[in-house]
Amino acid sequence: GPVGAATAFNVYFFLKIFVEWAGSNKPALGAVVELSDALGITFFVGSITTDQGLPELELWSYSKSTQGVLGRSPFRTLVSYFEISQLEVIDLPRDRSVIVLLRDNVLPTLVMASPVDNFATRDGTIRVSGSAYDSQSGFVFDPNDPQAASMYVQVSSDNVTWQTVNVRASSVFEVQFDYTFTGLQQDVDAIYIRALDEAANIFLKVIPIRID
């Protein structure tokens, strides 16, 4: 070949990518990661299934020859989770481990079936039931352990001490729950319900009640 061709070489570095929810630093399980190079060519698509992130990738960072340096880096990293989509740009001048923080700014919501506002009772027993919804990071759902989702909904009669609820049904985006308060004293004037999502966003609902 031509003189100097032998001096051309490619430089590779390792890249390890983790995807976590900003706010909670929990792994964004189910997030899909698409990697493309500086030329816009997509060369890897994978998903986050554990807290170990993506498999370590050995990437062609740049080529060096008598003509100069041809860079394949920075790499464009498109992370998506249902309707959340986030683009990160990663330079690779050396081996790197990168944590992509996925942002979820949408609070969960609560739709209550009971009690109704200003519910009155004599015996200090109140049944709480309803559903929590979240459209973004959502809730971890385990078909083998329906109660796993109970950590996302909590109830209180004083806004200080919180109890986890009983989960009636759940999915990635919905938790149906109930809980029964017993022995409530007359000074209790509200029931508090709070919902959390995987990104640690909190929604609080206060239902005024009366114990006669």
Image: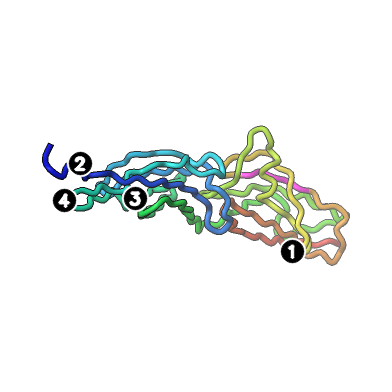
Q: Nearer the viewer, residue 81 or 68?
A: 68
Within-10-Å neighbours for mark 3: few <14, some 14–19, many 20+: many
Amino acid of disc 2: Ala
Q: CA distance from mark 4 to mark 3?
A: 25 Å
Earlier-in-chain disc, 4 versus 3? 4
Image location (x, y in percent) of residue 12: 35, 45
Residue mark closest to the camera, 2 vs 1:
2
Q: Which mark is residue 76?
A: 3
Q: CA distance from mark 1 to mark 4?
A: 68 Å
Within-10-Å neighbours for mark 4: few <14, some 14–19, many 20+: few
Residue mark closest to the camera, 1 vs 4:
4
Do labels 2 and 4 touch, CB within 8 Å?
no
Give the magenta-colored segment's residue range. 175-179
Amino acid of disc 3: Arg
Q: Which mark is residue 6?
A: 2
Which residue lies at the image location 76% right of the left edge and 53% below the top edge? 163
Residue mark closest to the camera, 3 vs 2:
2
Earlier-in-chain disc, 2 versus 4? 2
Q: Which residue is mark 4?
A: 67
Task: Tell whether 92 sits left or right of 139.
Answer: left
User: In terms of secondary structure, where does tag 1 sit?
Assistant: loop
Q: CA distance from mark 2 to mark 1?
A: 72 Å
Question: Please, is residue 172 above or below residue 125 in the view?
Answer: above
Q: Which residue is mark 1?
A: 159
Q: Nearer the viewer, residue 196 or 47?
A: 47
Earlier-in-chain disc, 2 versus 1? 2
User: In terms of secondary structure, where does tag 4 sit?
Assistant: loop
Q: Nearer the viewer, residue 197 or 48?
A: 48
Which residue lies at the image location 74% right of the left edge and 64% below the top edge? 159
Within-10-Å neighbours for mark 2: few <14, some 14–19, many 20+: few
